[in-house]
Amino acid sequence: MAEVPQKLDRYDRQILAALQADARLSNQELADRIGLSPSPCLRRVKRLEEIGLIEGYRAMLNARYLGLKLMAFIHISMDRHTPDRFDLFESHVLKLPEVLECHLITGQDADYMLKIIVEDMDEFQRLLLEEITRIKGVTGVNSSFVLKSPANRTALPL
């Protein structure tokens, strides 16, 4: 992967903003939107992909439609702060499809914060008791349930 340029020009920023809003734009639509012809627009998109600035394209799904109605943040405390303990925890968590995000954090009485989504409280209990608390090294768990998400962005500020 090449190094990300220190400064993106206005066309690069416009491309990134447009693709974050709608990654299904055709190259022609994208070129028209940002004011370039299709060939240079496509070259810029390919370059942004090659340097790793564009990591991929995904469909955003409606969780409620899929029956996933319970979202929570779980703070996890570990018994030891060692690379092997963290690696073990992370390798287990990465196998759990209910875990949307996993962050090693500071400034709390916890070491990790997980964002999870499940169908209901029964599934939450199963995930917590049969999976997360059984990971070697987990000593504490504190959960907060999401009541409402007035901001739920995936687009990065440019």
Image (cartoon, rainbow, N blue to C red):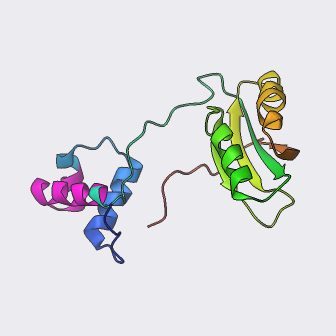
When the figure is inspected, residue 140 is found, relative to residue 65, above or below; the finding is: below
Q: Is residue 2 left or right of residue 108?
A: left
x, y percent for residue 152: 60, 49
- Does the magenta stretch mainly form a helix, a strand or a loop? helix
50 vs 131: above or below: below
- Residue 136 lies left or right of residue 31; in this view the side is right
Q: Quadrant of the N terminus?
A: bottom left
Image quarter of residue 69:
top right
Residue 121 image position (x, y, % from top left) = 82, 26
* Rendering quarter of residue 62: top right
In the rendered image, residue 129, in percent from the top left (x then y), is placed at: 84, 29
Front residue (pair 124, 138)? 138
**For the magenta stretch, what is the residue range?**
30-49
Residue in the picture at 67% in, 54% down:
103
Question: Quadrant of the image for the C terminus?
Answer: bottom left
The residue depicted at 28 percent of the width and 44 percent of the height is 25
Number of marks in the image?
Answer: 0
Q: Is residue 137 above or below residue 67?
A: below
